[in-house]
Image (spheres, grey):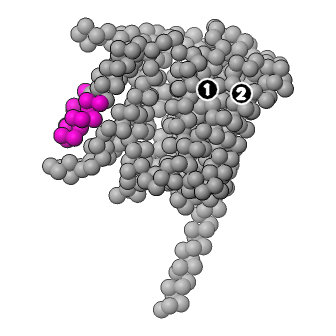
């Protein structure tokens, strides 16, 4: 049953990857068209949600980032919990590998950025920018080019990217936070604790939805990223089947939410975040020290950090390689981690505050896009090679088994 669930997820993501890519391309076209002003105005437009005395006002961009993407992180958290309890990550050494690789994938990009910016006399303040991995885009690319590869690789990427993203969120909180509202934060934590206790009574789906909604509202009011509490909420959803129905709340939630996340949430997110204007761009600015530092931090730093830490962890017997995966396949996934995109762009805004068309902001966008594109192309080539090699080995193995069976007959 677990294999079928994983197959369904892979099949959905392979199909939704095209929708995500088309949405990103559409955003780039619109952002550089006569409708660019309308596009950016739409992202900045404020919308109000009012439920009785409760009022929340956010821009379109923030509603998508903190609202819709909270569902994405909830689904990701549910899948990781499922894998820890019932799947690939139930082996502690298999769980250790993506965590160790994520740490390497945060440290190495910082080092590469600082080394390159120092050599080119660039600004040192952008070192946090290449730290993050864009989970949505990385998973979409894997879905498109990773067909036929072991599903354990996707679990490895998913877990690694979550740890990476949570590390980036904590980095943002430590370096750029303007302060978190304590009362609503404690309220969100209290709601998670309450639902964890109440969940033992096998509550209906409506109660879980209400609890998640209250927790989300309090998290937004606290100023903390909803991705963090969405993953925490996923950890308390029961995995064991209900006695009355025999259905698992966690599996039901994954099954029900995943198509909406794959075909609605992520394409909208891509359309809102991929729109970058190249108006007024010069060749000199395209190769500025800040651009090169960020691009190499993502493309070179990520693959060195992730793959190097994973390889070293297995050699020291601290962790095990994903089931059925080769080192070439792990290297391809390491390249995917260099897709920083939205989280890197967000950190760039915090690291270099100013107008969206300022010199630094334009260079940040160019560096992030350049590094992410190089990582995507590199990963696509390596994973295609790995996929072909894997398919060839499987055919040879099947032929050998068939030959031995005929021989025994």
Residue 325 is one of the magenta-drawn residues:
no
Looking at the image, can residue 386 be seen? Answer: no
Residue 358, percent from left and from top: 69, 10
Query: How many residues crowd around disc 1 within 10 Å: few (fewer than 14), some, or many (20 or more)?
Result: many
- Whether the residues at callouts 1 and 2 have beta carbons within 8 Å, the answer is yes
* Residue at the farthest left position: 244
Residue 284 placement: quadrant: top right
Which mark identifies residue 344? 1
Q: Is 186 drawn above or below residue 339 in the view shown? A: above
Q: Is residue 118 above or below residue 183?
A: below
User: Whole-percent x and y of residue 153?
Assistant: 54, 51
How many other residues sit within 10 Å of disc 2, few (<14), some (14-19) or many (≥20)? Answer: many
Position of residue 102 relative to residue 91, above or below, is above
The answer to whether residue 240 is visible is: yes
Q: Is residue 189 left or right of residue 224?
A: left
Instruction: Judge whether 18 appears above or below 398 on screen.
Output: above
Q: Residue at x 57, y 73 (%)?
A: 397
Element type at mark 1: helix
Stretch in magenta: 193-210
Q: For mark 2, what is the residue?
A: 294
């Amino acid at each position: 049953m677990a294999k079928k669930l994983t197959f369904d997820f892979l099949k959905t993501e392979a199909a939704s990857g095209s929708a995500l890519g088309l949405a990103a391309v559409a955003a780039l076209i619109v952002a550089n068209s006569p409708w660019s002003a309308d596009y950016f105005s739409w992202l900045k437009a404020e919308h109000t949600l009012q439920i009785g005395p409760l009022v929340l006002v956010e821009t379109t961009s923030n509603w998508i980032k903190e609202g819709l993407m909270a569902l994405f992180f909830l689904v990701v958290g549910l899948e990781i919990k499922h894998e820890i309890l019932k799947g690939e990550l139930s082996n502690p050494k298999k769980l250790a590998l993506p965590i160790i690789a994520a740490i390497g994938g945060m440290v190495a990009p910082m080092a590469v950025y600082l080394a390159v910016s120092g050599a080119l006399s660039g600004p040192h303040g952008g070192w946090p920018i290449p730290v993050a991995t864009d989970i949505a885009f990385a998973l979409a690319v894997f879905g498109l080019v990773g067909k036929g590869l072991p599903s354990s690789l996707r679990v490895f990427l998913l877990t690694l990217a979550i740890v990476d993203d949570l590390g980036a969120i904590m980095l943002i909180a430590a370096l750029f936070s303007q302060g978190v509202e304590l009362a609503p934060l404690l309220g969100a934590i209290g709601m998670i604790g309450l639902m964890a206790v109440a969940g033992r009574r096998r509550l209906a789906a409506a109660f879980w939805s209400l609890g998640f909604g209250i927790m989300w509202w309090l998290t937004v009011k606290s100023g903390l990223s909803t991705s963090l509490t969405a993953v925490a909420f996923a950890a308390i959803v029961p995995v064991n089947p209900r006695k009355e129905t025999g259905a698992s709340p966690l599996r039901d939630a994954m099954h029900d939410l995943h198509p909406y996340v794959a075909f609605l949430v992520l394409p909208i997110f891509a359309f809102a975040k991929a729109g970058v204007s190249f108006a007024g761009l010069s060749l000199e600015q395209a190769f500025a020290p800040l651009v090169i530092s960020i691009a190499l931090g993502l493309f070179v730093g990520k693959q060195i950090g992730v793959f190097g830490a994973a390889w070293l962890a297995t050699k020291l017997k601290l962790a095990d390689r994903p089931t059925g995966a080769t080192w070439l396949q792990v290297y391809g996934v390491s390249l995917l981690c260099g897709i920083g995109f939205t989280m890197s762009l967000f950190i760039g805004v915090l690291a270099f505050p100013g107008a969206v068309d300022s010199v630094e902001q334009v260079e940040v966008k160019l560096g992030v896009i350049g590094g992410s594109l190089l990582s995507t192309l590199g990963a696509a080539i390596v994973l295609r090679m790995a996929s072909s090699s894997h398919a060839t080995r499987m055919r040879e193995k099947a032929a050998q088994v068939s030959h031995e069976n005929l021989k025994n007959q």
